[in-house]
Amino acid sequence: MPSSKNGNPISRGGKGEGRKRMGHDKPATHRGGCPCCSPYVWDAYRPRDPGLSRRGFFGVGAAFTAAALSALTGKSEAGAAGAAGLATALAFTAPAIALGETRRSRADAAPGVTVYRGGTIRTMNDATPLAEAIAVRGGRIIAAGTEVDVAARAGRETRIVDLRGRTMMPGFVDCHGHISMTALLMGFQNLAPEPAGPIRCIADIQSELVKYREKTGGGRGGWLLGASYDDSLLAEKRAITRTDLDEVSTTQPILVYHASLHVAVVNSYALSLLGITANTPDPRGGVIRRWPGTNEPNGILEEGALSLAMPRLPQASREELLDLLDMVQDRYAAWGITTAQDGATRGPDYELLSLAAERDRLRLDVIAYPFFTHIEDLARSEVEMKRDYNGFKIGGIKLMLDGSPQAKTAWLTKPYEVVPTGFDTDYRGYPIVDDATAAKMVDDAYARGWQVYAHCNGDAAADQFIAAIEKATVKHGLADRRPTVIHAQTLREDQLDLMQRLGVMPSYFVTHTFYWGDWHRDSVLGVERASRISPVRSTIDRGMRFTLHNDSPVVPSDCRMLLWSAVNRRTRRNEVLGEEQRIGALDALRGITLDAAYQHFEDDIKGSIETGKLADLVITEEDPGVMAPDDLKNLTITETIKRGETIYRA
């Protein structure tokens, strides 16, 4: 969003509206004419806090959560407005776990002992980093060490599994992602560019939509739905329009989401179905893009204009939503993940995950961090923080303090390298809440003994969070709270020093070096700042704990890409971005195993192969500790084990 000379954002506004000054510190100005989110979504999910802007409430991609739910549950605009309680008075009712047998109780009661031997067993335990064998009983590790010691502990009635030279490690932990939103996206065709998807050009998008029609038997409710297309990475280097989608069909509606999650494209049939014509005015806070020199819509709907399409999208049952969640869990398991996260959880997300726990549909453990608008709801709820409800638990709360560097909405202390058209030359992005609000939210969390995460891409946002942590620590005292800076793209050396003193962890979205590294260097941050995005080496040199994440569905939760990116730091152009911040493979592994479990307060039961911990394990064909660094992204995962039960086998 452009800024005025005083640093306040300026709305682009709707057609004919012109520009009006808007301040992030004046939330009332975000109620109209602001291209931050859809008015439909805002009305459906409006928070109670009058001091919170629409931009602050939704953050990156949040509008898509509600929009996708509309697509998959078929809420009408009126019905969605009536569903405001999902965000404004969420009950956080504890999952009603039925008495009787569950997947986890069966694992705990499983008879016999299984011994794994004959390969490389990387324990991630500094005291004994390698083991010759391990023994598992009742979903837990009962011995790890030499074959002689393990055999003595296992007894005679054992099942022997020969690893045949393969490597065993602790199961991978998704340190920050949005599994419920990822599940919603599974109902759309993947139109992401390579390697996250199959798309290189517009013809590929058209081909994938045809495949979607075939695999769904005509589409979902007659609609062809796609997501995650990125025009900046298309061979044509342009946005798709209704004309491109008309080549797929002129007899059924099509909607495709942009990777930004704030823009959609529809075909001519959909425009007709939605009643969008040359005479349709731009809705509040949105834009209907037109063909140059005319009022005729070209099919691109921005921000608030999405409200014209969402109520008409098809619906899915709760069973279909659970099936989509099953598909995501299958994919995570194939990447070696045994614990997933749902960051910034909102009402519909909580209901889906709670239902999955009740139905015993969680093969992975899922840890939720509800969005900060739900602080009071959580305080009143019957849910016990950190209690395991059949694989589902609430770990703390999630704050949103700025936007994203690739969209140039992250809040920086220095201006962007290339300021977008219409921005002042000193534009640095902007905060979502003021300092006092951030400090109050952190203080509330500390007072209740809750863990707090904060989305901070820019270093100014990190300054705000660290200052709030420092203030709360003076008031409540230093304790083991493990507050975490999520994404942490532009952390400075002085900030790492303060974080170390205050016990603050960074969780790095390190695959930025690949997905947007060239963009960061050339346009967002410049060479010097871009070369130290995700400063993992600086963190390790201080002896600090850290984690690595992919932020699914922004990019896939493939932990192999985390290892490869942290070790190689290569961009799409195959150029090294910040060689001095490269780390070794074993250090990177800590960021998705032991330190990842530590971030979740689960290092007593997960993250390393030690006696007494859960048998959450992954087996790979190669040993990432010794394989060629450039091959890490092709690490072959052959089996994933959750509580002693195989949940994936190649």
Image: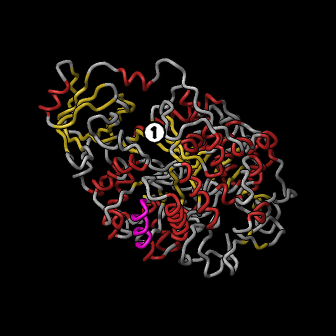
> In the image, what residue type sits under mark 1?
Arg
Q: Which of 452 and 30 is in front in this view?
A: 452
Q: Residue 34: where, in percent of width, then height?
A: 75, 63
Q: Is mark 1 on a helix, strand or loop?
A: helix
- Residue 552 visible in the current orientation: no
Q: Residue 88: where, in percent of width, then height?
A: 72, 45
For the C terminus, give its image quadrant.
Answer: top left
Q: Which of 19 and 382 is in front in this view?
A: 382
Would you say 200 lies left or right of 561 here? right
Q: Nearer the viewer, residue 417 or 533?
A: 533
Residue drawn at x 81%, y 72% is 18
Mark 1 sits on what residue? 331
- Quadrant for residue 93, please give it: top right
Is 630 rendered above or below residue 497? above
Residue drawn at x 47%, y 68% is 490
Magenta part of the chain: 493-503
- Quadrant for residue 545, please give it: bottom left
Residue drawn at x 65%, y 34% is 218
Q: Which of 505 and 501 is in front in this view?
A: 501
